[in-house]
Amino acid sequence: MASSVVKILVNTQSWSDQVNSSPELQLLLPEEKSQVKRYYFAKDANMAMASMLVKRQVLATLFCTKPDSVRISIAENGRPYYSKKVSENTDFDFNVSHYGGMVVFVGIWISKNSPISTQSPRSIGVDIVECKSLSDEPNWMDDFEFVFNREQWTQVFSSGDRLAAFFLFWASKEAVLKSLGLGLHGDPALVELQIPVFQDFVCGSNIHALRAGTASYAKSRFQLELQKLNINGSVFFIAIAYPADLEVLESDWLEVSSLSTDHLQQKIIEKFNYNTMKF
């Protein structure tokens, strides 16, 4: 049985710099407000707010409860999870990423009866990056050579668009490591990637592929979904790492720019046909 995916893209680029008067801030839990107020830059605070809210609002909608009753736990490996189960045989796994004012949430139902091999994790990972130089120094990429193996590094520098090639690989590797809960503790150079549509994504624009390629890290195996978007003149890559053996249904992104009141919850109900909400 194929697994359904919920994909939310929150654009905070137009959110106010006056974080303390933001309507989204009023929806946060007390401990979340304290975390947000520690950020020096408003854009970082806004992305943090969006990340907190999108997780609770999506989970509240799917599990028929109130957003302020949702409590998200953190596993030993650092991955967030929601302890409430869909059913005895189905888990809901999710992951979040943010960059450049954009916040992405991806969640998936995974049946315990799904034919996933022991070499595939029963979890997903997502990463979003903005295709933008990380420094004004002309050779800044050299500082990140450790992220790539020799073949990948050669592929980046032989590409017609080095910046796009660099961030396409970067997002794919991050998605894999986040699926495993490794993040910065993993070795990105050991993430092997096979992306047959590599050149299409490097050279194309606003392109999407559900089965864009495969990846591996140690004994774990993944399939990759890739998206390249042009948003307000900036190019973003989104990579999602799924278990290699999991059959995933095609789905579009639900794009929103507001998380105030029940805006997102109503959008989820409309898009994904959730017609009952039992508060």
Image (spheres, rainbow, N blue to C red):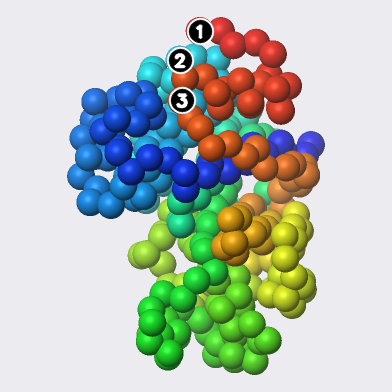
Q: What numbered label is drawn on residue 112?
A: none
Tell me the crowding category of disc 3: few under 14, some 14 to 19, or many 20 or more residues within 10 angstroms, Cα based: some
Would you say the residues marked 2 and 1 are in contact, meaning their CB atoms lie under 8 Å apart?
A: yes
Would you say the residues marked 2 and 3 are in contact, meaning their CB atoms lie under 8 Å apart?
A: no
- In this view of the protein, can residue 6 be seen by the observer? yes
- At 78% from the left and 44% from the top, the residue drawn is 250
Q: Position of residue 27 (x, y in %)?
A: 36, 23
Query: What residue is pinned by disc 3?
Result: 260
Query: What residue is pinned by disc 1?
Result: 279
Q: Amino acid at mark 2?
A: Lys
**SS of the residue at dot 2?**
loop
Would you say the residues marked 1 and 3 are in contact, meaning their CB atoms lie under 8 Å apart?
A: no
- At 75% from the left and 70% from the top, the residue drawn is 204
Q: Position of residue 54 (x, y in %)?
A: 48, 34
Mark closest to the chain's N terminus, 2 or 3 = 2
Work out how far the residue at label 1 is from the one at label 3, CA to CA, in angstroms: 18 Å
**SS of the residue at dot 1?**
loop
In the figure, is residue 126 to the left or right of 193?
left
